[in-house]
Amino acid sequence: MHFRHVPGRPGKSAGRRWAGASIDRKYQVLGLLGLGGMGAVYRVKHLGLDKVVALKTLISKTFSMEAWQRFEREARAIARLDHANIIKVLDFGIAENNLPYYTMELVPGESLADRLRRTGPLSLPHDAKRPAEAPA
C-alpha cells in the first residue's frame, strides 16, 4: 500500500502527536509509518506480548457508517487470507472514542514507492513474461 501526505490531513506531526499514546489499553504508539486516503498506519508495541506490530486506523475524527463498515470489511477480508506473501491481520478492535483499528505483522524494509524511486520499474520474472497457455 502506498502512503502519502494528504493535504488537510495530519502529516508526520500526527506520528509525533500520537507517539507514546495508548490505544485500547493494549498498544503503545511508537511512531507513524504512513498515511493513506482514509487511514494512518502506526508502529505500535503490544503491551501484553511485548511485540512490535503495525496498527491501521481511520484518520478522520468523524467518519460515516459506510466508511466504518468498509474498514471492518477490509480487516476481515485480509484476515481470511493465508499466504506467505500476505501480511497477517492479528487483531481488530474499537478503541476510545469509537476509533476502529486493526493490527498486522510489521515487516521490516522499504515501501514499494521508496524501492521504485531507488531502482526504477521492477522487471517481471521470466515466467510472468510468457503468455499463458490456452486451456485444451
Image (cartoon, grey):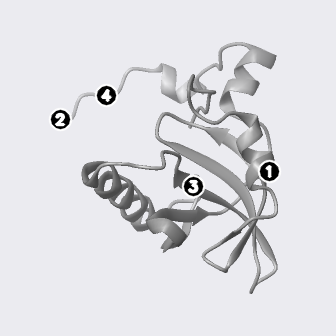
Residue 128, image x, y percentages: 50, 27
Left or right, residue 124 beside residue 22: left
Q: Which residue is mark 4?
A: 133
Image quadrant where residue 75 sits: bottom left
Q: Residue at x 24, y 28 (%)?
A: 134
Left or right, residue 46 beside residue 23: right
**Closer to the observer: label 3 or label 1?**
3
Q: Which residue is mark 1?
A: 108
Amino acid type at circle 2 is Ala
Q: Dot 2: within a 10 Å radius of its alpha carbon, few (fewer than 14), some, or many (20 or more) residues? A: few
Q: Mark 2 and mark 3: span between their CA atoms?
A: 45 Å
Which label is found at residue 50? none
Mark closest to the chain's N terminus, 3 or 1: 3
Q: Dot 3: within a 10 Å radius of its alpha carbon, few (fewer than 14), some, or many (20 or more) residues? A: many
Q: Is residue 82 visible?
A: no
Q: Residue at x 57, y 26 (%)?
A: 6
Amino acid type at circle 4 is Glu
Q: Residue at x 58, y 52 (%)?
A: 85
Left or right, residue 126 beside residue 58: right
Q: Which residue is mark 2?
A: 136
Q: Mark 3 and mark 4: span between their CA atoms?
A: 40 Å
Residue at the far top: name it.
Answer: 120
Name the residue nearer the viewer: 93 or 14.
14
Mark closest to the chain's N terminus, 2 or 3: 3
Mark closest to the chain's N terminus, 3 or 4: 3
Mark closest to the chain's N terminus, 4 or 1: 1
**Closer to the observer: label 3 or label 4?**
3
